Image (cartoon, grey):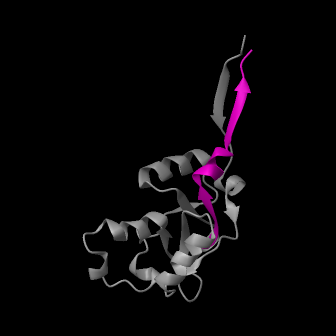
């Protein structure tokens, strides 16, 4: 007879996030961004300005949504800044895994930029990362 299990969450965003994320500059070409999506298995990137400050995020859905328009060629898109999400979808690295899950579902995104002191990008957290915060306890 199998025992019942109890699922619970534990930890902070900093415990599960991926550190030193790959970022993209807001002035990079869309061609470069598309190459980045093809080269990596990421759902998005934090977008920075020339000084390295977080200014947005760009998701795979932002690129794909271009083709949901009737005539994608009629829109002038040249650089990352033209398609990025503002303000960036962020969570402080000190927040709980539970709060990150709630925010991710509320914002309907697969990843969040994880920030630290001064709003600096410290990492990214994905849905897969958040699963590391789930623990299982077998009930006797």
Residue interval drawn in magenta:
120-140
Q: Image height check: is 110 above or below 30?
A: above
Q: Is residue 75 left or right of residue 9?
A: left
User: Could you tell me residue 15's position as x and y percent?
Assistant: 71, 53
For this rendering, which residue is in front, 92 or 49?
49
Q: Which quarter shows the C terminus?
A: top right
> Residue at the location (32% across, 85% down)?
76
The verdict on residue 139 being magenta is yes
Q: For residue 10, say whether it is visible.
A: yes
Image quarter hosting the N terminus: top right
- Which residue is pictured at 53% across the width and 85% down the height? 49
Residue 66, horizontal then vertical, whole percent: 35, 71
Establish if 51 lies above or below 116: below
Query: Residue at position x 67%, y 18% from top?
Result: 4
Residue 119, given in percent of the width and then of the height, sits at 57, 71
* Quarter where residue 45 is shown: bottom right
Residue 96 in view: no
Q: Is residue 73 left or right of residue 96?
A: left
**Is residue 21 covered in magenta?**
no
In the depicted structure, whether residue 109 falls above or below residue 54: above
From the viewer's perspective, is 129 left or right of 44? right
Q: Left of 91 or right of it: where is 10?
A: right
Pick out the residue farthest to the top: 1
Residue drawn at the location 72% of the way across and 27% of the way down: 137
Circle count: 0
x then y, percent, for residue 90? 52, 63
- 46 or 30: which is nearer to us? 30
Quick check: 78 above or below 135?
below
């Amino acid at each position: 007879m199998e025992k019942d299990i109890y699922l619970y969450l534990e930890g902070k965003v900093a415990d599960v996030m991926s550190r030193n994320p790959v970022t993209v500059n807001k002035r990079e070409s869309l061609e470069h961004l598309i190459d980045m999506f093809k080269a990596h298995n990421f759902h998005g990137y934090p977008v920075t300005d020339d000084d390295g400050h977080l200014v947005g995020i760009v998701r795979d859905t932002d690129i794909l949504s271009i083709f949901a328009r009737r005539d994608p060629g009629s829109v002038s898109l040249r650089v990352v800044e033209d398609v990025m999400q503002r303000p960036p979808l962020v969570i402080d690295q000190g927040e709980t895994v539970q709060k990150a899950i709630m925010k991710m579902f509320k914002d309907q995104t697969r990843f969040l930029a994880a920030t630290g002191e001064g709003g600096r990008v410290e990492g990214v957290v994905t849905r897969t990362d958040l699963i590391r915060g789930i623990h299982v306890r077998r009930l006797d």
